[in-house]
Image (cartoon, grey):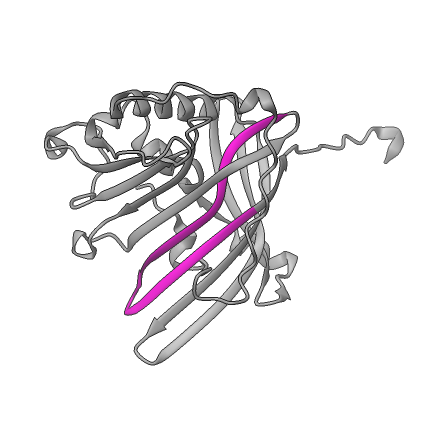
Amino acid sequence: MFLHPISLVLFSISALSPHAPAPASPAPLTFTQIRPAAIPSTADELVDRLVRNAAALDATLPSITAHEVVQTYASRRFHRQQTRSEGMVQVVRIASAGTLTETHQMTAHNGKPVASDDRAQTTQPSDGFIAEQEMFFSRSTRPCFTFTLAPQPTQSDPLQLHIALSPEYASLAGCPSGLQGLTGIARVDPATHQLIHLERTIPTQAGSPISFVSTDYAPASVGDKTFWLPDLTISTGAQGKSSVYTAVYYSDYHQYAATITVLTAASQ
């Protein structure tokens, strides 16, 4: 259900950690990528654009990899624990199905390298990298939510959508389960109409182990193209009787390519 599996195990904490690394500076956009566009006048027009953006990203994003720093702050009464992990995220396109699969692998934990023999145990699949925006901005799930466009103070301020569950949510087929009480916010860059911030809150009593998730998006160059990809993800929730605050920083996006070496009989 659109949850980041490592969030309760390794999710980071930027606001509570004075040593948290600063988010990587986004790659600059070219003039053609930031030419002014008409500001959507209704929530439906803006959501239409975000749905198209999410579909285009899902269809065109190549296999990529990025550096990942995960900081976690867990507290239980007077006991507090902070951890820092470092590794990579891989989002790989499966050619036969055309779909994207996601894995996370940690290579260092609290400043100590993770042995190569142990890395297989630290590799965790997830679908939270892209699925967070697809949760709200896909043609199949759009009827599950209502969107309200907030007044824009000035034309340079981000556009802001307030998100809630549709009154028909419980009776609609295909809606994600376990979202009772959900509220959300989406902020959109007014020049490019790209999503720059997305957050959702689910009351703890709804049974979700993660009560709050937010993602900041920024332009990243992959090859000769620019995509708006996660820059920082923050989550809060519970693991057992402990409260967990996590932040994940992404940087150094580049195209991922697997190489295969074929040995001939003469080379053996």
Dominant SS type (magenta): strand
Q: Nearer the viewer, residue 120 or 216?
A: 216
Per the rendered image, the range of residues in magenta is 225-250
Query: Who is closer to the viewer here, 203 or 29?
Result: 29
Q: Position of residue 250 (x, y in %)?
A: 54, 47
Is 29 left, or right, of 171 in this rendering?
Answer: right
The quarter of the image holding the C terminus is top right
Question: Image check: 186 left or right of 73?
Answer: left
> What residue do we see at 12% from left, 35% from top?
170
- Picture residue at 62% right of the left edge, 31% below the top: 222
Whether the magenta-drawn stretch holds residue 237 is answered as: yes
Question: x%, y% of residue 75?
Answer: 35, 72
Quadrant in the picture for the N terminus: top left
Residue 237, quarter of the rendered image: bottom left
Q: Residue at x 28, y 69 (%)?
A: 241
- Residue 171 falls inside the magenta stretch: no
* Percent of width and height locating residue 210: 30, 54
